Image (tube, helix red, strand yellow):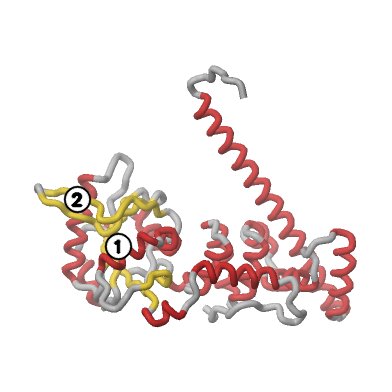
Amino acid sequence: MPKTNLPADYTAWLGDLKTMIKEAQQRAIMAVNAEMIMVYWRIGNDILERQEAQGWGAKVIDRLSADLRSEFGGAGFSPRNLKYMRRSAAEWPDVQFVQQAAAQIPWFHNCIILDKIEDSDTRKWYVKAAFKHGWSRNVLVHQIETRLHERTGKAITNFAKTLPPSQSDLAQETFRDPYVLDFVDLAEGAHERHLEAALIERIKDFLIELGSGFSYVGNQYHVQAGGNDYYYDLLFYHYRLHSFVVIDLKMDEFKPEYAGKMAFYLNVADDCLRGDGDNPSIGLILCRGKNGLVVEYTLRDMSKPIGVAEYRVLPPDLAKALPSPDELEEKLSQVIESTETAPEGNESSGVKAPKG
């Protein structure tokens, strides 16, 4: 390519064009996905109505599959997928919900939710959450299996008293209890630094478990106060809350003095880190256990926004027995590939999450 004298703003302009093109491509993909799922839902609804009115059996679905595939090819109209279409229409009778939520996530996400969750309200929760947060297939499976719907917003906090209403509800929803750190392998006798190092080593997994909106700033983050040095175990910034989030890791049960230390950390963070447009910094104390009443008494009259939650890690013996993340990824791919060739009548894959 011959050399050209480019305008000074060319690089920035090119970056803007690339972003615009990628966003347009993504919107086009989402539009195609939504239209396809609406077609699938209508097919499923037609099958339901005809089965009820005419007593259709499996043989008709097999014939319909063969006729559609001869015209359009591909695996989208396999007998198995037609049965998923029928299930989606049966589970989502409200076409408005399908248009606004179910059609906004990939078709296979819908199939996973249908397979793994029995309760209708819980299914809707995961459909909306997958759309809102843009979860990948693997993340969706993980969130279902760790029962995220039961953990969201469950941390014990004083946010209602220490944050303005416009922020406190979002903050409460943001923090979970417990946090499932099943990707962390800690040996017997491990200390807080070992847990911190394990989380940093798997920071992507930790960010997924924290939830959307968190941006990692650093670990052992250095601040000064009164000529003394202090270090935050973990520091994040939450772009929706517009707040720094200081996380203090504990290897034992919650103690009241932990909140006093966190309040000090937050005072320093507000003075040293908080900028124009930032909301008050928030603290999260992660412990191996807690007495809920002790936590509530401790936070009752504190003026700094603090949340307390437990975390769960795999027992060392169990961690050694489990396959590696790469092995799990390979196994999941094999399961997905087998969905089109599985024998008819065995539509469910994986272990269903309990109701509720």
Label 2: few (<14), some or many (≥20) within 10 Å?
some
As drawn, the residue found furthest toward the left would be 227
On screen, residue 117 above or below 282:
below
Instruction: Give SS at disc 2.
Output: helix
As drawn, the residue found furthest toward the top would be 5
Which residue is label 1 attached to? 284
Instruction: Please report contact status of discs 1 and 2: CB closer than 8 Å, yes or no.
Output: no
Res. 163 visible in picture = no
As drawn, the residue found furthest toward the front would be 2
Q: Quadrant of residue 346?
A: bottom right
Q: Residue at x 74, y 57 (%)?
A: 36
Which residue is label 2 attached to? 268
Amino acid on which the number 2 mark rests in the picture: Val
95 relative to 117 in the view: left or right: right
Sequence-first tag of 1 and 2? 2
Label 1: few (<14), some or many (≥20) within 10 Å?
many
Q: Position of residue 41 (x, y in %)?
A: 74, 64
On screen, residue 224 above or below 4:
below
Q: Position of residue 88 (x, y in %)?
A: 70, 69
Q: Residue at x 88, y 69 (%)?
A: 66
Amino acid on which the number 1 mark rests in the picture: Leu
* Front-most of residues 282 and 165: 282
271 relative to 79 in the view: left or right: left
Separation of marks 1 and 2 at Cα, in angstroms: 15 Å
State which quarter of the image contains the N terminus.
top right
Q: Position of residue 209 (x, y in %)?
A: 43, 64
Q: Residue at x 58, y 36 (%)?
A: 18
Q: Quadrant of residue 79?
A: bottom right
* Front-most of residues 343 and 16: 343
On screen, residue 323 above or below 244:
below
Q: Residue at x 63, y 75 (%)?
A: 115
Instruction: Give SS at disc 1.
Output: strand
